[in-house]
Amino acid sequence: MKFYAAALLFDNDGVLVDSHAAAAIAWATWAEKYAPGWNWDVPEHAGVRAEDMVRKMVAADLFEEANNFINQLEQDTADQTVPLPGGLELVQSLKPGTWTVCTSANPNLGKARLAAAGYPLPAELVTAADVANGKPAPDPYLLGARRLGFDPADCVVFEDAQSGVLAAIEAGAGLVVGVSARALETDADIVVKNLSGIAFDGEVLTISDKSRLR
């Protein structure tokens, strides 16, 4: 498959990197203190900003304390992050200014996870702190496209979670690529196993048929 595009916008966790195990432990520890019995590890929580989940789970007077606690727990385990198949190879082949990451993580956590997995840090990085509304609102992908200087319609978004897919669709992305078997349950235009078998020369995105799940 070939698709004409100007830039690529990547979600981070679940697309470029695997931080799931560490995040699950962090949230389980957080829940023991602030929301006993609550389970973070369900599909509807994937891709949602920590602050947005915390705000729903605790009283307003506990928000700052509870939000700082999960931020610290996740930061403490960021060094356990590893790259997902094909991600490093694809990113290292891209020209500066033709890609960025739009993550729901806070700035310190997003940067730490990218660094731990060996990724370069894009100058146009978008984090939870950069937008008024997190995914599934379109703000992260609208800002990512704007920072690169392109119309969202000329960008391809790579996502693994329904919240991020909905954000990309609402932003008007030209193509939304779901990543991993989990993404088969999303509204992504197409779904690939991982980022292996994908190439981008700044004008044409090529996706190997062997990489596609849908």
Image (cartoon, rainbow, N blue to C red):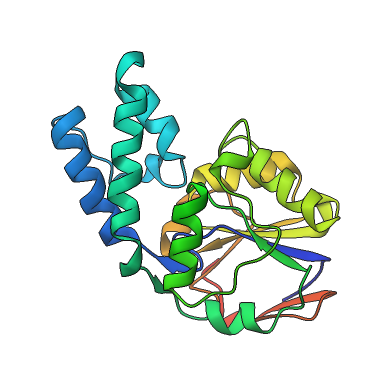
Residue drawn at the location 74% of the way across and 44% of the way down: 142
> Which corner quadrant of the image does residue 65 belong to?
top left
Between 95 and 173, which is closer to the camera in this rendering?
95
Residue 198: x %, y % from top left: 64, 80
> Which corner quadrant of the image does residue 149 belong to?
bottom right
Residue drawn at the location 37% of the way across and 45% of the way down: 43
Residue 198 placement, left or right of 211: right
Residue drawn at the location 29% of the way across and 56% of the way down: 76
Residue 171: x %, y % from top left: 72, 42
Residue drawn at the location 82% of the way across and 66% of the way down: 5
199 shown above or below 136: below
Assign the N terminus to one quadrant of the image: bottom right
Between 105 and 39, which is closer to the camera in this rendering?
105
What count of labels does the image hold? 0
Residue 186: x %, y % from top left: 51, 49
52 shown above or below 149: above
Residue 39: x %, y % from top left: 22, 39
- Would you say residue 184 is visible in this rendering? no
Residue 150 placement, left or right of 209: right
- Would you say residue 213 is visible in this rendering? yes
> Which corner quadrant of the image does residue 196 belong to?
bottom right
Between 69 and 144, which is closer to the camera in this rendering?
69
Residue 113 placement, left or right of 23: right
Assign the C terminus to one quadrant of the image: bottom right
